C-alpha cells in the first residue's frame, strides 16, 4: 500500500514520519519547495522533539521520501492524508483554500482508486464537500472514499502523541465503510481506542474537544482573577478542584491564556459553525473574550506597579507554549506589542522560537541568547512561556542581574515562598503579590 501526505507542517510531517516508522511506505508533498529541499536533506523545517532523527531513520530505511512534484506524490497513492493548513479568515471562519487546492491536485494526478483521509481540522460538512469536489474533478472511472480522521497531537510532544494518543477518530459514510475498515487496520498496531462514527460527528469531535479545553483554561483563569480579589490562592484552589475525578486535574493551570495555531482559530470557527445554523454559542464567545483579556493582563498588572515608558523590559519566552518553535497567536506577541506601545525597550529571549518570532514582531525588539543576557540591567521581567530553562533560573539570579528585580510571571513558575526568600517583587496569576 502506498501512502501520500499533503502538507509537511506539524501535522503532516508527524503523520508521514510516524506512518513510515510503523512500516508503511510514505511520500510527503508540500507546495513550499524550500521545506521539501530541507526535508530531502534530512532536516526538519519545524522543531518537534524526536522528529528529525525519526525522519532520517525512515529515509535511510527507504520508507519515507519527500517531493514537490504532485504527480510523484499522488500518482501511485492508495491513501492520501490531507494535512494542509486551515487558517482563520477575517470573519473567524476556516479558510479552506489550501484544502481545495490539495484536493484539486490529487484529482488531476491520481491513477487509481484512492482513499482521502482528512487530518486537518475542518468545519462540519467539509468532508462531504471534498467528496463532491472529487466527483467533479477526478477521472470518472476512478473511485474516491473520504474519511474524517481529525488529529489531536500536541505540539511539543507530537511524536509521543502519535504512538500514545488517547483515541483515534474515524468518521465515514456508509458507502465508505470499507475504507474506514482499512484505516482502522492501519492504526490497529498502535493499540489506541478507535472511535468509529459518521463524517459530521468526527468533524464535530475535533472542534468540541478544543472548545472544551479552551473553556477549561478560560474558566480557571477567571477563577484565578477572582482569587486575587478575595485573597485565595489559585494553586490550592486548582488542586482542590482537580482532585474531583469528574473534573480532573489537567488544564487547570492558571496563566495568561491559550494561544497557538489551534485553540484560537478552532474556537472562533466553532462559533461560526454554530452561527451558520442559527445557534449563538454564547459560552464559547465568552471563553474567547476572557482569553483575549487574559493575554493582555500581565501588562495591565505591570502598569499598576510602574510606568513602562523608557524602561528596559526582559520578555522571557516567545513560543505559545514550551517545547515548540510555534509562535502563532502566542501571548508573547500581544505582550510585546503592548510593551512597545507603552514605550518600553524590549529584550526578548526564547531557546527555540526566536527566528519564527522575528517574522511576527516589530524590528525594534532586541533578542538575547540566554535568560541572564535578557534580564541583565532590566527594570522588569515578564515570564510568558514556561520553558525549563526559564523556570529553572533561580530567582536569586533575577535579583543579582536586574536593575530592579520586578518579575511579572504569566505562568506561575515560582512559589510565593521562593519569591519571598529571594527578596524580589513577584507578581503572578491568581495569587497574592510579593512586594
Ligand atoms: P502548518 O501550517 O504547520 O502546515 C501546513 C502545511 O500545508 C504547510 O507546510 C503548507 O505549505 C502546506 N500546504 C498548503 N497548501 C498545500 C497544498 N495545496 N498541498 C500540499 N501542501 C500544502 O499546519 P499544521 O499546524 O500542521 O496544521 C494542519 C492542520 O491540522 C490544520 O487544519 C490544523 O488546524 C490541524 N491541527 C493542527 C495541530 C497542531 O498542533 N499544529 C493539531 C491538530 C490539528
Image: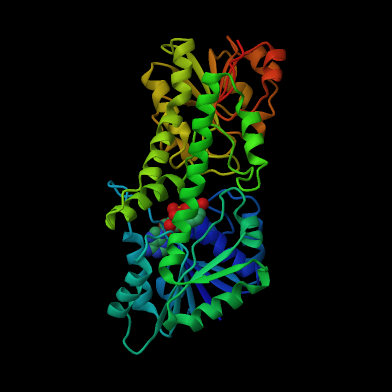
Residue 183 appearing in the image: yes
Q: Position of residue 128 (x, y in %)?
A: 35, 72
On the rendered image, what quadrant is the C terminus found in?
Answer: top right
**Residue 35 x, y percent position in the rendering:** 47, 56
Nearer to me, 194 or 81 = 194
> Residue 6, located in which quarter of the rendered image?
bottom left
Residue occupying the point 51% across, 25% down: 226
Residue at 65%, 67% (x, y): give it: 21
**Is 221 left or right of 233, judged from the image as shown?**
left
Left or right: residue 174 compared with residue 400: left
Left or right: 289 in relation to 244: left
Q: Residue at x 59, y 59 (%)?
A: 42
Q: Nearer the viewer, residue 332 or 231?
A: 231
Q: Residue at x 45, y 21 (%)?
A: 299
Does 46 appear above or below 404?
A: below
Residue 339 in the figure: left or right of residue 52: left
Q: Position of residue 410 (x, y in %)?
A: 54, 27
- In which quadrant will I find the N terminus? bottom right
The figure's colour scheme reads: rainbow
Ligand 1's quadrant is bottom left
Amino acid at each position: 500500500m502506498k501512502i501520500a501526505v499533503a502538507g509537511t507542517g506539524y501535522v503532516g510531517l508527524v503523520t508521514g514520519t510516524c506512518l513510515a516508522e510503523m512500516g508503511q511506505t510514505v511520500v510527503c508533498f508540500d507546495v513550499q519547495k524550500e521545506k521539501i529541499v530541507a526535508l530531502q536533506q534530512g532536516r526538519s523545517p519545524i522543531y518537534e522533539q524526536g522528529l528529525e532523527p525519526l525522519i532520517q531513520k525512515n529515509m535511510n530505511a527507504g520508507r519515507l521520501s519527500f517531493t514537490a512534484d504532485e504527480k510523484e506524490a499522488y500518482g501511485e497513492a492508495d491513501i492520501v492524508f490531507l494535512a494542509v493548513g486551515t487558517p482563520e479568515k477575517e470573519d473567524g471562519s476556516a479558510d479552506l483554500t489550501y484544502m481545495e487546492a490539495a484536493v484539486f491536485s490529487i484529482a488531476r494526478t491520481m491513477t487509481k482508486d484512492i482513499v482521502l483521509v482528512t487530518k486537518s481540522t475542518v468545519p462540519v460538512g467539509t468532508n462531504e464537500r471534498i467528496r463532491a469536489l472529487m466527483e467533479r474533478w477526478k477521472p470518472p472511472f476512478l473511485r474516491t472514499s473520504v474519511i474524517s480522521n481529525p488529529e489531536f497531537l500536541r505540539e511539543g510532544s507530537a511524536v509521543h502523541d502519535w504512538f500514545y494518543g488517547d483515541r483515534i477518530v474515524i468518521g465515514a459514510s456508509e458507502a465508505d465503510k470499507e475504507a474506514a475498515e482499512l484505516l482502522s487496520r492501519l492504526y490497529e498496531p498502535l493499540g489506541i481506542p478507535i472511535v468509529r462514527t459518521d463524517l459530521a460527528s468526527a468533524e464535530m469531535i475535533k472542534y468540541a474537544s478544543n472548545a472544551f479545553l479552551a473553556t477549561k483554561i478560560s474558566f480557571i483563569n477567571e477563577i484565578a482573577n477572582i482569587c486575587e480579589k478575595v485573597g485565595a490562592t489559585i494553586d490550592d484552589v486548582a488542586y482542590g478542584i482537580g482532585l474531583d475525578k469528574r473534573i480532573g486535574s489537567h488544564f487547570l493551570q492558571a496563566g495568561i491564556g491559550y494561544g497557538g495555531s489551534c485553540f484560537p482559530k478552532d474556537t472562533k470557527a466553532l462559533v461560526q459553525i454554530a452561527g451558520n445554523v442559527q445557534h449563538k454559542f454564547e459560552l464559547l464567545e465568552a471563553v474567547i473574550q476572557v482569553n483575549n483579556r487574559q493575554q493582555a493582563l500581565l501588562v495591565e498588572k505591570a502598569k499598576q506597579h510602574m510606568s513602562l515608558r523608557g524602561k528596559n523590559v526582559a520578555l522571557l519566552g516567545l513560543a505559545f507554549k514550551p517545547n515548540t518553535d510555534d509562535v502563532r497567536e502566542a501571548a508573547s506577541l500581544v505582550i510585546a506589542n503592548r510593551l512597545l506601545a507603552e514605550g518600553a525597550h524590549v529584550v526578548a529571549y526564547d531557546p527555540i522560537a526566536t527566528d519564527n518570532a522575528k517574522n511576527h514582531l516589530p524590528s525594534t525588539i532586541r533578542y538575547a541568547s540566554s535568560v541572564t543576557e535578557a534580564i541583565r540591567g532590566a527594570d522588569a521581567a515578564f515570564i510568558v512561556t514556561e520553558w525549563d530553562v526559564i523556570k529553572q533560573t533561580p530567582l536569586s539570579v533575577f535579583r543579582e542581574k536586574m536593575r530592579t528585580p520586578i518579575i511579572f510571571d504569566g505562568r506561575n513558575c515560582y512559589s510565593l515562598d521562593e519569591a519571598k526568600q529571594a527578596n524580589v517583587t513577584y507578581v503572578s496569576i491568581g495569587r497574592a503579590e510579593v512586594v
